[in-house]
Image (spheres, rainbow, N blue to C red):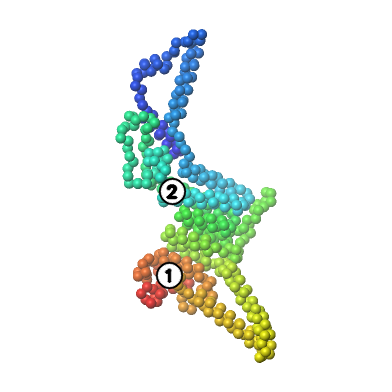
Amino acid sequence: MAETRLLARSWTLLGRGAAKPSKPCCSVWYQYIRPRAAPPNTTTGSDTRWAHTTKQKAVKANVRKQEAPIVTETPQSRAFSRLNDLLQDALQILSSPQPPAEAAVLESLSTCKDLAKYFKDAQESPNLSNLKTNSAAANLLFLDSHNKQQPYPRPSTPLESQPTSEATIPPSAPSPYIASSIANEAKATISTAAWDLIRDAKVFITPDILKSYVEIQSLLSHPESLAEVFSLYASKPIPQPSKGSEPIKFYPSNPNKISTAIPFDTASTALSAAIRAEKLTLALDIIDRTVCTPSFRRAKLVRRALVPGIALASVPVGAYSLASQFSAVQEALSSANATGIAFAGILTYFSATATIGVVAMTTANDHMERVTWANGTPLRERWLREEERQMYDLVAAAWGFKEGWKRGEEEGEDWMALRELIGMRRMMLDRVELMEGME
């Protein structure tokens, strides 16, 4: 619709700027319209008038074709065309009677992500270096050039005095705020389409789908649905494809299973989006539904502690084998006594070294900024809940003073509620002996 109005406005302005005829109407009629004298051996009358009228129409069509502006496809029109295709694909997936394939959902979300990047870049730093101020594309975008404060240049002479080919089209609405509103509306449409797609009962949320959705909402600056989508990922019923006309069967999902744990990278992306949006309640909800769940801690135990635990369990077997070999190369003691002493010494060495390493790893606080563990927190709990403490640290750093010498002087209901919540989680906010100037 915008392009149609633009073309109509362009033709009107070009019609106003066309050169006026220099001869009187009768002279024009005498030269172009009156019937010419018939050459020898030719017919006259209606045939001659018909031939001359056809020739005149062809000349006018040729002139109109040369004067018509060439409207090329712009990146903006392609983006809105892809947005329309996205809505059609999402509607097709939602109206399907069977659960869609993961590849189809990922393809739609990939289109959402590309469009989100485009509208985000166009809204924050529009690239108009290849557009002229008074061009058709500039009118279509309702955007100014790089210097938004500089007014549009006006032609030095009136449009009526310029030739048609050199006439410029003044902008109709050179306001960047209109373009910003259009971009916001497009971003809201993309966010709604992605949310409707992922919350549909037939769509099974996989880790890749969840990651793509979180990235889309983060790019669009619409993180309001991230906490709810994490709950859907853990507890949404699993659809089972049906045969023929039978209805789809849904099986309940166990939210405490290891497979329902939210990946830490995805949770960090969601938390960063909530912090940028300055939504404290949403940030705390994201922490509660990601790294504070039993499934996340079980997944961490299995993925990061299973292999070291197996290796630690195999230490006695290896130590006894080494002790037996040692007893065979000595003659001072009996074989049984030498094996026992060597076995005890090897186990003592490994146990002491491993204990020192675990204590050093769980008590290190160089990476902590404002939130630290309270005294008496077990070391195993510190290791299991390190990601939780890290996220609370990010929230405290974002909502508190950025200057180090001001820390500890924050006030307000939100800050006091955050401090109390961190204390209930067996952590401390702004430990005095770790603050600047309090060593």
Residue drawn where x is 65% and y is 81% of the image: 322
Looking at the rendered structure, the kind of residue marked 1 is Glu
Q: Which residue has dot 2 on it? A: 122
Residue 202 in view: no
Disc on res. 369:
1
Q: Is residue 347 left or right of residue 370?
A: right
Q: Residues within 10 Å of mark 1 (few under 14, many from 20)?
A: some
Using the image, determine if residue 327 lies above or below residue 28. Answer: below
Q: Position of residue 134 (x, y in %)?
A: 38, 39
Where is the C terminus found, in terms of image quarters?
A: bottom left
Q: Nearer the viewer, residue 404 or 202?
A: 404
Q: Is residue 353 left or right of residue 22?
A: right
Q: Is residue 161 left or right of residue 211?
A: left
Residue farthest toward the left in the current orientation of the protein: 156
Give the structural element (helix, strand or loop) at label 2.
helix
Q: Earlier in the sequence, mark 2 or mark 1?
A: 2
Q: Nearer the viewer, residue 288 or 354?
A: 354
Looking at the rendered structure, the kind of residue marked 2 is Ala
Q: Nearer the viewer, residue 225 or 38?
A: 38
Using the image, determine if residue 33 lies above or below residue 184. Answer: above
Q: Residues within 10 Å of mark 2 (few under 14, many from 20)?
A: some
Residue drawn where x is 62% and y is 74% of the image: 311
